[in-house]
Image (cartoon, helix red, strand yellow):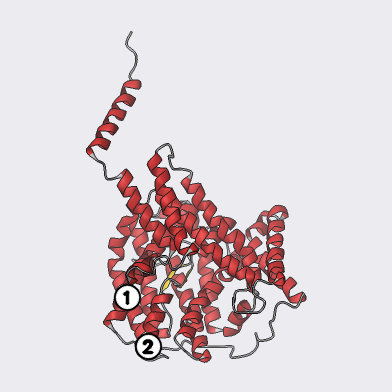
């Protein structure tokens, strides 16, 4: 990217340390719950002890921060230099649990992640070439379904975060979420431009204070445990490489590459900057390099966090240095667990109240992109309709693909992947694969348009 592009592109804007810290903290609060969820689920499912799960969480926070720094700041060949937050991929959770509970063990998970990530680095340049198959009808569908697929996360937060808890769906949880949402709406309506940009963070703080005053937040355990935790190199032992585990994770790698490509295109659309094939390849390589290093510290595959796409859209803060600061905060949290425990103590319903606006804004960004599509062509309407319905299937009925091969189940477990596949294939079918009849019709149309623009001879 040349110097002129750097000066013009909004993602390269320098906002100063104070704004970087405040806006960066917003990103951390937005994605923190999702970041620690994957290691908690995997660790619990394969029978790790609580101390080991805590190590997984710390490692995930640290690697997520380092991966974010690589993605946003970038080096040659690695990093899209876009405001993208990185974290542990949830797409890999089911595959890792399957490996860990069928005799493979935790070390086999780490080995499979490592090898499949190297595989991802190798195919990234080829995978990035598919960007030419992502016109607005495809990217709009993907961005819309990203927002829709995140709404269940917000709803789970609102209901309490833990379905097994006695307070799940209680009026107190709904009230905390509603109050946080009211704070956010009032800040957006009456706040100054600076306050509006920080409305998510301020609303979460106000919601947490209100919950604390009403006795629904507990920060008593924040001071318990160690304050400093250095990275644990190969704390779980050396990775074990099993072919079946590696092959299953390679399928997951394709899913993650697809989702990260979609996220890069989405953030490029929101930021309003050029996203071409080399830039996507750099972003994918950063994803996979972070994933390849993660197992050495007991962490898993990394990916772009789609929930933070909504934060960029709703705040209008497009600087990659803001997100890089968020990555630095994550590194600190990974080394100083007390700060992680502080953030983790924020009640889930408070995050859910903010998540309604946050995740909904992603869907709105997709709808705005879809408004560029020509719906006079019936085929375009069909493409959008089928692609969106395909993406909603896993949300409505997670067992829909249960009778299909394992690879198909893994790939279509994500609504984003399903929408991406259907939108691309249908767009190729209707708009690129022309029959002789279609070509003749286009020629006749062009001929009539040309004749219509010819000057009338006297």
Q: Nearer the viewer, residue 182 or 402?
A: 402
252 to the left or right of 361: left
Residue 267 visible here: no
Mark found first going from the N terminus, 2 or 1: 2
- Front-most of residues 342 and 174: 174
- Most distant residue in the top direction: 458
Q: Give SS at disc 1.
A: helix
Place residue 401 in its image quadrant. bottom left
Instruction: Give the farthest residue toward the front.
Output: 403
- What residue does disc 2 label? 105
At a point 32% along the width and 44% down the height, the residue shown is 431
Say whether residue 241 is visible: yes
Q: Are marks 2 and 1 in contact (CB under 8 Å)?
A: no
Q: CA distance from mark 2 to mark 1?
A: 14 Å
Q: Quadrant of the C terminus?
A: top left
Q: Which mark is residue 248?
A: 1
Quadrant of the rendering where the N terminus is positioned:
bottom left
- Residue 262: x and y in percent read 41, 59
Q: What residue is rendered at 72% in x and 73% in y? A: 211
Position of residue 100 relative to residue 141, above or below, is below
Secondary structure of the residue carrying numbered label 2: loop
- Left or right, 394 with respect to 125, comes to right
Residue 351 is tagged as: none
Residue in the foreground of this view, choosing between 60 and 430: 430
Residue 227: x %, y % from top left: 59, 88
How many marks are shown on the rendered structure?
2
Q: Is residue 181 above or below residue 451?
A: below
Q: Which image quadrant is residue 453 in?
A: top left
Q: Residues within 10 Å of mark 2 (few under 14, many from 20)?
A: some
Q: Position of residue 119 (x, y in %)?
A: 29, 72
Q: Residue at 47% x, 65% y: name it.
A: 397
Q: Position of residue 368 (x, y in %)?
A: 51, 47
């Amino acid at each position: 990217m040349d110097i002129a592009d750097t000066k013009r592109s909004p993602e390269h804007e320098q906002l100063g340390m104070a704004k970087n810290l405040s806006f960066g903290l917003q990103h951390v609060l937005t994605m923190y719950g999702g970041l620690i969820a994957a290691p908690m689920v995997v660790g619990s499912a394969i029978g790790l002890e609580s101390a080991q799960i805590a190590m997984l969480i710390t490692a995930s926070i640290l690697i997520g921060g380092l991966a974010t720094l690589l993605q946003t700041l970038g080096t040659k060949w690695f990093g899209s230099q876009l405001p993208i937050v990185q974290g542990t991929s949830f797409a890999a959770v089911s595959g890792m649990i399957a490996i860990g509970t069928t005799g493979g063990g935790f070390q086999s998970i780490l080995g499979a992640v490592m090898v499949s990530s190297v595989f991802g680095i190798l195919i990234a340049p080829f995978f990035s070439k598919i960007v030419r198959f992502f016109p607005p009808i495809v990217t709009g569908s993907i961005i819309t379904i990203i927002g829709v697929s995140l709404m269940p996360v917000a709803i789970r937060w609102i209901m309490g975060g833990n379905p097994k808890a006695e307070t799940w769906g209680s009026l107190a949880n709904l009230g905390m979420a509603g109050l946080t949402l009211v704070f956010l709406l009032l800040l957006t309506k009456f706040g100054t431009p600076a306050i509006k940009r920080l409305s998510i963070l301020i609303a979460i703080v106000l919601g947490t204070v209100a919950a604390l005053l009403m006795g629904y937040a507990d920060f008593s355990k924040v001071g318990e445990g160690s304050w400093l935790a250095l990275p644990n190199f190969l704390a779980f032992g050396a990775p074990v490489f099993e072919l079946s585990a590696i092959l299953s994770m390679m399928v997951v790698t394709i899913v993650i590459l697809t989702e990260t490509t979609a996220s890069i295109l989405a953030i490029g659309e929101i930021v309003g900057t050029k996203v071409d094939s080399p830039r996507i390849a750099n972003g994918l390589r950063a994803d996979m390099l972070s994933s390849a290093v993660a197992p050495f510290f007991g962490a898993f595959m990394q990916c772009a966090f789609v929930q933070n796409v909504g934060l960029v859209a709703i705040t209008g803060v497009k600087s990659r240095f803001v997100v890089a600061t968020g990555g630095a905060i994550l590194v600190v949290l990974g080394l100083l667990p007390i700060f992680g425990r502080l953030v983790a103590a924020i009640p889930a319903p408070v995050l859910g109240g903010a998540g309604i606006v946050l995740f909904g804004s992603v869907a709105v960004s997709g709808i705005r992109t879809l408004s560029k599509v020509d719906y006079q062509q019936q085929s375009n309407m069909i493409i959008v309709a089928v692609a969106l319905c395909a993406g909603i299937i896993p949300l409505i009925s997670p067992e829909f693909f249960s009778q299909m091969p394992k690879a198909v189940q893994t790939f279509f477990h994500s609504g984003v992947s399903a929408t991406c596949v259907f939108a691309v294939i249908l767009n190729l079918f209707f708009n690129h694969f022309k029959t002789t009849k279609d070509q003749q019709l286009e020629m006749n149309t062009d001929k009539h348009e040309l004749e219509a623009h010819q000057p009338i001879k006297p």
